[in-house]
């Protein structure tokens, strides 16, 4: 399940399912000691054999929230649970669905029955066996109305799930469900540890026990999440010993950590990518990557607000915002205008939909139709004596979003709309404002699944607290199309359906779809076996390694 509020650096590694001083590395568990014999990068003509050891330090501007796959809704949580848990299936680097916990599976001719055969000898990090009972338990919790998961809709059409033996699960559907295989990429959770607990509040959320390539060590809120390699992982032990997820909520400070090699992997801002990472040292010490992100950035509206219920207002704001100016001025050209929820790389994308032209005059005319004019001559639109004023809410630490909000503020001022900007710490932003619908407009981004099913984002049934349709969008035609898209396996028919969804959403403008930005991760050049693919650079993270002579850290027990 890849849909999440995005901020990730590692990308697909986080979805396998992603102190400012050197003394920060000292802990009660270990000390990371710089290797004094660090050497330059080895020649690509004679790559050294993989060797274990070292640590990777990943920088993030936001902390995780809940380390349980069925409750992980932000990218930081997704990055971590992707290293702790596996689903039955996963995508490989060619976007093919392959086995993960399932070593094989079969699908009946009518597409309604799926039988999964689990790998033998997979164990939880506490030593207990992973069995079909865990798969059944995970499913039961996904459909439990008392569990605040946004993913339940992907399992509503399951008629029955039967455990045939310890390593075999048979799943029958009431009717065809096209995204079925992708839905079983959800991380499996442990029945023996969670049965009888309230999953919304269990201590497990902060001290998870998984079965993935890394095991949980500790979580210091707002500072660090630490994982260590699982020596018993069924594929093989990851070569990198330690995974340190540093939370550095300011992008400038995070970049300084890159400059001083206090962080090995982080996402760059467009400015950093274009202008601040081209020195000989940075080119020698790091590798930069660039590829289109599979998602989009948007300005979303609380559609319970009377102003934004009027489609003319939303369409006017779409005309009043110059997206190309945002791309050139903030992204330094590293992105493309969004015409809806699908990037061009998605087969749900309709190429016939062209961006609405930037046209402030047309925007003002639409606003006047909706009753918003400058009646008192003060330069601001008003209606019934009330100025058209609203606040854009976004998360702290994201410089790109802050700059985009400021440009939108200026552009909407030009048509007479008074915009305020408020930034909030990430965890508070999600749980106190997004989950509780306490906002007028939000500036955010979505990372998307490869299947173009958008049921969780835009179906009218998914508006409850904790679910993804937090703007409150409801369109009966879109509801119908989203259901039809799930219930047919005919690819050409699904293409037509999602093209229609694309068109409806761009006309309705529940969001102002702004742009698809390029992903810009930067990684220490000491790591090998790193290959960019359609799903990012992290799909094979367990195969990354640093040659012994280039390893920067080793672990020693503290006296």
Image: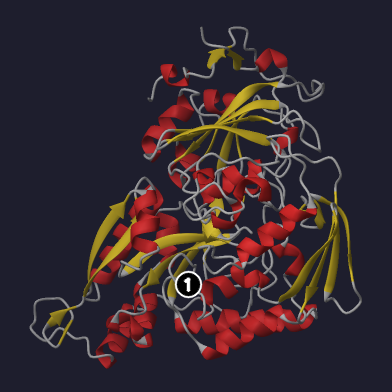
Q: Where is residue 521 in the image (x, y as percent from the top left)?
A: 57, 41
Please say if 64 is above or below 149. Answer: above
Question: Residue 413's spot in the image, x, y percent?
Answer: 23, 70
Q: Residue at x 58, y 67 (%)?
A: 144
Front-most of residues 143 and 524: 143
Q: Is residue 29 visible?
A: yes
With respect to residue 501, does 65 lie above or below?
Answer: above
Q: In this view, does 375 lie to the left or right of 542?
A: left
Residue lying at 85% horizontally and 47% vertically, measured from the top left: 119
Q: Give the percent coordinates (x, y) of residue 376.
A: 7, 83
Depth order, front residue of 257/231:
231
Viewer-closest of 252 and 137: 137
Residue at left 69%, top 36%? 125
Could you say whether the residue bearing mark 1 is in a helix, strand or loop? loop
Crowd rating for badge 1 (residues with CA inside 10 Å; few <14, some 14–19, many 20+)? many
Is 426 placed left or right of 446 in the picture? left
- Pick the residue in front: 231 or 270: 231
Q: Label 1, on which residue? A: 469
| Quadrant the N terminus occupies | bottom right
| Residue shown at 71% from the left, 37% from the top | 213
| Number of numbered callouts drawn | 1
Q: Can residue 16 be seen by looking at this rendering?
A: no
To which quarter of the image does residue 387 belong?
bottom left
Q: With 383 as the anchor, is 555 left or right in this view?
A: right
Residue 466, x across and y down, in percent: 46, 64
Q: Which residue lies furthest to the bottom in this view?
A: 369
């Amino acid at each position: 399940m890849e849909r999440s509020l995005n901020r990730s650096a590692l990308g697909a590694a986080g979805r396998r399912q992603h102190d400012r001083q050197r003394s920060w590395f000292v802990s009660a568990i270990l000390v990371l000691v710089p290797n004094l014999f660090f050497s330059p990068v080895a020649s690509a003509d004679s790559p050294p054999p993989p060797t274990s050891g070292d640590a990777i330090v990943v920088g993030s501007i936001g902390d995780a929230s809940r380390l349980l796959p069925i409750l992980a809704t932000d990218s930081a949580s997704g990055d971590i649970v992707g290293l702790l848990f596996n689903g039955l299936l996963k995508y490989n680097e060619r976007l093919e669905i392959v086995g993960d916990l399932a070593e094989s599976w079969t699908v009946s001719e009518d597409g309604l029955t799926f039988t999964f055969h689990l790998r033998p000898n997979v164990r939880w990090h506490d030593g207990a066996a992973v069995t079909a009972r865990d798969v059944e338990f995970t499913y039961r919790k996904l459909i439990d109305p008392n569990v605040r998961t946004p993913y339940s809709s992907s399992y509503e059409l399951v008629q029955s799930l039967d455990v045939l033996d310890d390593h075999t699960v048979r799943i029958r559907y009431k009717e065809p469900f096209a995204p079925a295989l992708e839905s079983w990429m959800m991380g499996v959770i442990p029945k023996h540890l969670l049965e009888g607990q309230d999953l919304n509040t269990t201590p497990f959320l902060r001290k998870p026990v998984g079965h993935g390539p890394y095991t949980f060590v500790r979580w210091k809120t707002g500072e660090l999440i630490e994982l260590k390699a699982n020596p018993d992982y069924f594929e093989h032990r990851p070569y990198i010993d330690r995974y340190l997820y540093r939370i550095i909520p300011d992008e400038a400070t995070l970049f300084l950590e890159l400059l001083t090699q206090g962080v090995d992997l982080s996402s760059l801002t467009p400015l950093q990518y274009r202008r601040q990472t081209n020195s000989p040292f940075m080119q020698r010490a790091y590798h930069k990557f660039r590829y289109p992100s599979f998602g989009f950035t948007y300005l979303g509206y609380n559609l319970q607000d009377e102003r934004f219920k009027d489609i003319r207002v939303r369409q006017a704001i779409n005309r009043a915002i110059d997206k190309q100016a945002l791309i050139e001025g903030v992204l330094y050209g590293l992105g493309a205008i969004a015409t809806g929820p699908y990037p061009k790389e998605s087969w749900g994308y309709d190429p016939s939909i062209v961006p609405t032209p930037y046209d402030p005059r047309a925007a003002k005319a639409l606003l006047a139709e909706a009753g918003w004019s400058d009646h008192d001559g003060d330069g601001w639109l008003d209606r019934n004596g009330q100025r058209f004023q609203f606040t854009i809410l976004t998360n702290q630490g994201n410089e790109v979003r802050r700059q985009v909000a400021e440009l939108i503020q200026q552009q909407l001022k030009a048509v007479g709309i008074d915009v305020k900007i408020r930034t909030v710490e990430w965890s508070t932003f999600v749980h106190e404002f997004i989950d509780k619908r306490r906002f007028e407009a939000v500036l955010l981004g979505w990372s998307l699944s490869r299947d173009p099913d958008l049921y969780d984002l835009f179906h009218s049934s998914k508006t409850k607290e904790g679910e993804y349709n937090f703007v409150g969008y409801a369109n009966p035609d879109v509801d119908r199309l989203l259901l039809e898209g799930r219930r047919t396996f005919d690819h050409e028919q699904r293409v037509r359906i999602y093209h229609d969804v694309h068109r409806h959403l761009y006309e309705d403008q529940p969001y102002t779809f702004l742009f698809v930005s390029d992903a810009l991760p930067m990684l220490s050049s000491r790591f090998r076996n790193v290959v960019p693919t359609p799903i990012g650079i992290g799909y094979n993270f367990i195969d990354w390694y640093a040659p012994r002579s280039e390893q920067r850290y080793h672990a020693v027990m503290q006296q």
